[in-house]
């Protein structure tokens, strides 16, 4: 039996949500404005969207990689929140804290000494475009393991140097292909694409994949401020 391609898999999962009437993309509000009807529909169905997407997520199943020949070097568009922040890679520090037994900070050099991996995946933007990209870096679950989460920790917050903020569920954060990356297409990550360190994963939409990450915080509760775009109406789970 022939296995479905990555693109077929993406379409089938998203199509399943669309056919069920529970697609997060179908309910995402356009831009920053919404009608009263949009607000009512979103508030009604967003918890259902999340439940369905959580059921679809297999926390250990790997997403098939594309071949390196499929990389689309020019297809990854640069979206910035407040412009590209200036960060000195030599002075950069990543802090991991929150509801953990071991808070710590790591320099970029220390991160690069950790066991690393790479993947060639499709980056999917909620705006309707996609790009096949090779990312290289440290599995986020390795950093979380070092921090030793306290019992009851369920969420992971990401703070960025430009003021952007984002939150994930812990299960998605522990997926083997959720990475903190410092390489793109075999080269050092550029500042425009999120250097020194950014999130990358084939299981989340692009707005969930924070650039210029400086702090990772584990929490037991999901705070009212869930994420920059989510607080303007986008779906929180943001899964593929």
Image (cartoon, grey):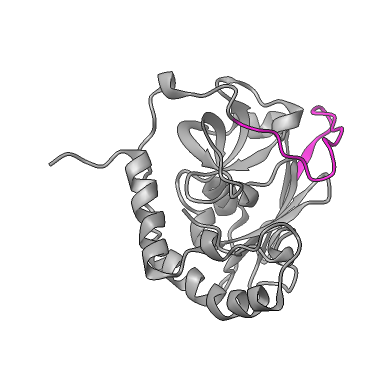
Query: Residue at the left extreme?
Result: 1
Residue 89 is one of the magenta-drawn residues: yes
Residues drawn in magenta: 76-94
Whole-percent x and y of residue 61? 35, 50
Whole-percent x and y of residue 19? 37, 65
Q: Looking at the picture, tell me which residue is in the foreground, 190 or 14.
A: 14
Whole-percent x and y of residue 142? 54, 46
Above or below: residue 11 compared with residue 87: below
Q: Looking at the picture, tell me which residue is in the foreground, 212 or 50.
A: 50
Query: For residue 33, what is the image quadrant?
Result: bottom right
Q: Looking at the picture, tell me which residue is in the foreground, 234 or 211.
A: 234
Above or below: residue 190 compared with residue 100: above
Q: Looking at the picture, tell me which residue is in the foreground, 15 or 10.
A: 15
Tell me if I can see residue 141 in this picture: yes
* Left or right side of 31 for 68: left
> Which residue: 56% across, 66% down?
27
């Amino acid at each position: 039996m022939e296995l479905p391609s990555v693109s077929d898999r993406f379409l089938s999962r998203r199509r399943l949500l669309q056919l069920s009437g529970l697609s997060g993309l179908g309910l995402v509000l356009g831009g920053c404005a919404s009608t009263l009807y949009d607000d009512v529909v979103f508030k009604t169905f967003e918890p259902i969207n999340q439940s369905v997407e959580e059921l679809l997520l297999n926390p250990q199943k790997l997403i098939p990689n594309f071949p390196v020949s499929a990389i689309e070097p020019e297809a990854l568009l640069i979206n910035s929140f407040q412009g590209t922040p200036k960060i000195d890679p030599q002075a950069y520090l990543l802090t991991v804290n929150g509801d953990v037994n071991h808070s710590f900070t790591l320099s970029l050099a220390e991160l690069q000494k950790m066991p690393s991996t790479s993947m060639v995946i499709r980056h999917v933007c909620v705006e309707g475009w996609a790009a096949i990209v090779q990312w290289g870096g440290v599995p986020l679950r390795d950093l979380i393991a070092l921090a030793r989460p306290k019992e009851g920790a369920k969420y992971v917050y990401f703070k960025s140097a430009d003021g952007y903020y984002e939150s994930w569920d812990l299960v998605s954060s522990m997926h083997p292909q959720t990475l903190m990356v410092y390489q793109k297409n075999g080269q050092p990550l550029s500042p425009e694409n999120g250097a020194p360190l950014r999130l990358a994963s084939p299981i989340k939409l692009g707005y969930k994949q924070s650039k210029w990450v400086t702090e990772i915080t584990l929490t037991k509760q999901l705070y009212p401020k869930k994420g920059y775009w989510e607080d303007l109406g986008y779906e929180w789970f943001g899964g593929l």
